Image: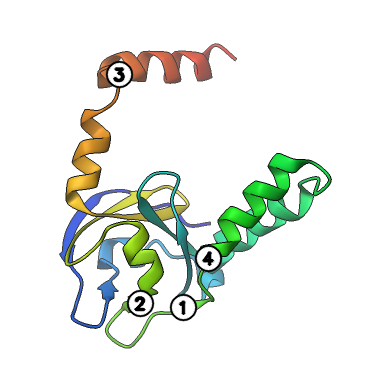
């Protein structure tokens, strides 16, 4: 199982490749085989799933009821934006498909965030807008989320 954390500022190279930070690579499980699947995020960012984590997500997709409209929509919307498997090259980079870079409005500068089972890639401007647009401050959200998980 992969577990990623941290924030890293990087730049895409001229061919649209991004380097996976060493601190994140060391948390890749051997089952991932240095392979990622890239898809759109819930916000204007990209999700990079190590292959083993993607396979777990795919199992969940298989369990959805395809006779329910929202389940079909979610499956289609997610998979339509999903790349084929991408293997790290010898310099620990992956090539991100152009349509995904356009979706996330990524041109050159990026912020890479470790988000437990996945890695998120953001345009720095979009990340700052997202963080600043939250209706409550961090402390209030921590109290709501963590108190709810402890009260179970």
Count neighbours of disc 1 (C-alpha within 10 A) and say few if under 14, some if 14 to 19, many if 20 or more: some
Identify the image quadrant of residue 24. bottom left
Say whether disc 2 or disc 4 marks the residue closer to the N-terminus.
4
Q: CA distance from mark 3 to mark 1?
A: 37 Å
Count neighbours of disc 3 (C-alpha within 10 A) and say few if under 14, some if 14 to 19, many if 20 or more: few
In the foreground, 58 or 123: 123
Q: Secondary structure at mark 1?
A: strand
Pointer 2 with pointer 1, Cβ within 8 A: yes
The residue that mark 4 highlights is 82
Q: Secondary structure at mark 2?
A: strand
Say whether disc 3 or disc 1 marks the residue closer to the N-terminus.
1
Q: CA distance from mark 2 to mark 4?
A: 14 Å
The residue that mark 1 highlights is 86
Which mark is drawn over residue 94? 2
Comparing marks 3 and 1, which lies closer to the viewer? Answer: 3
Comparing marks 1 and 4, which lies closer to the viewer? Answer: 4
In the foreground, 102 or 112: 102
- 123 vs 35: above or below: above
Q: Secondary structure at mark 4?
A: loop
The residue that mark 3 highlights is 135
- Does residue 59 appear left or right of residue 54 in this picture? right
Residue at image location 47% in from the left, 57% down from the top: 2
Residue 90 image point, x, y percent: 32, 88
Q: CA distance from mark 2 to mark 3?
A: 35 Å
- Does residue 128 appear left or right of residue 113 in this picture? left
Q: Secondary structure at mark 3?
A: loop
């Amino acid at each position: 199982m992969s577990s990623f954390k941290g924030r890293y500022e990087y730049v895409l190279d001229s061919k649209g490749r991004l380097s996976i930070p060493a601190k994140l690579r060391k948390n890749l499980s051997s089952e991932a085989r240095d392979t990622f699947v890239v898809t759109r995020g819930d916000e204007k960012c990209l999700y990079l799933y190590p292959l083993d984590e993607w396979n777990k997500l795919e199992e969940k997709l298989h369990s959805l009821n395809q006779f329910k409209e929202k389940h079909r929509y979610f499956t289609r919307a997610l998979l339509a934006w999903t790349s084929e498997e991408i293997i790290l090259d010898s310099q620990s980079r992956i090539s991100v498909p152009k349509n995904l870079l356009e979706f996330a409005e990524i041109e050159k500068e990026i912020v890479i965030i470790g988000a437990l089972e996945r890695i998120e890639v953001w345009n720095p401007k979009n990340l700052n807008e997202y963080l600043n647009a939250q209706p409550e401050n961090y402390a209030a959200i921590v109290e709501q989320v963590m108190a709810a998980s402890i009260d179970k």
